[in-house]
Image: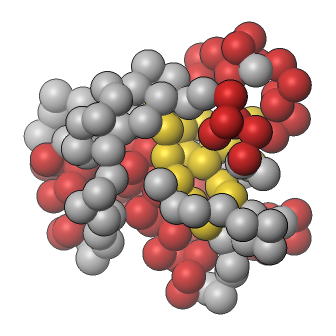
Amino acid sequence: MAQNNISTPLVTVICTANICRSPMGHAILQSKADAAGLKINVNSCGVQALTGKRPDKQALGALARAGYSIGEEKRAEQLLMPQANAAQLMLVMENRHKQWIMQNFPAYSGKVWLMGHWNGQSEVDDPIGKGPDEFDACLLVLEKNIDLWLPKLRAIL
């Protein structure tokens, strides 16, 4: 997990198990933010994380094909109170993730936004158990949504 400090805002990308969509979103957002000179730390968690597992091999393959990487140390992490508290913004893949956070951590509901908020409130479909084409398509959706978030992040963080 990226270390957060007072001066660097933390954005947490969230999916279900934290092995496919959120690690891909984590890697893409950190890479694009760094390239844009946006000083943020990015991490990822799951609402039903497969705690301790590495990202899915298909997710790692899609990232590599697109020129992104996520550190070898990345392991699935459950979204708990300390992570919710530390994040300035939580980007979720599905409305049900937002609902889960609002139910479990109601004090942080104002920090939770759908990754596809600026893309017609669209959800990001889970490619788990599918092939490279579906993971590549998921990565493209994440890139598009993150590209829409970047100017907003610069304004709010």
Task: Give the x, y percent position of residue 71.
Answer: 30, 65
**Is any part of residue 26 visible from this angle?**
yes
Is residue 141 positioned above or below 94 on the image? below
Task: Give the x, y percent position of residue 24.
Answer: 37, 53
Task: Give the x, y percent position of residue 114.
Answer: 67, 38
Task: Give the x, y percent position of residue 2.
Answer: 52, 61
Give the quadrant of residue 35.
bottom right
Is residue 129 positioned above or below 63 on the image? above
Choose between 104 and 73: the one closer to the eye: 73
Total numbered badges shown on the rendered structure: 0
Quadrant in which the C terminus is drawn: bottom right
Q: Is residue 30 left or right of residue 135?
A: right
Give the quadrant of residue 139.
bottom left
* Residue positioned 29% across, 35% down in the render: 52
Choose between 64 and 74: the one closer to the eye: 74
* Residue positioned 56% across, 30% down in the render: 79
Is residue 50 positioned above or below 54 on the image? above
Choose between 157 and 5: the one closer to the eye: 5
Display colour scheme: secondary structure
* Residue positioned 47% across, 75% down in the render: 31
* Residue positioned 55% across, 46% down in the render: 13
Choose between 30 and 94: the one closer to the eye: 30
Q: Is residue 152 left or right of residue 81?
A: right
User: Which residue is the extreme one toward the top?
Assistant: 103
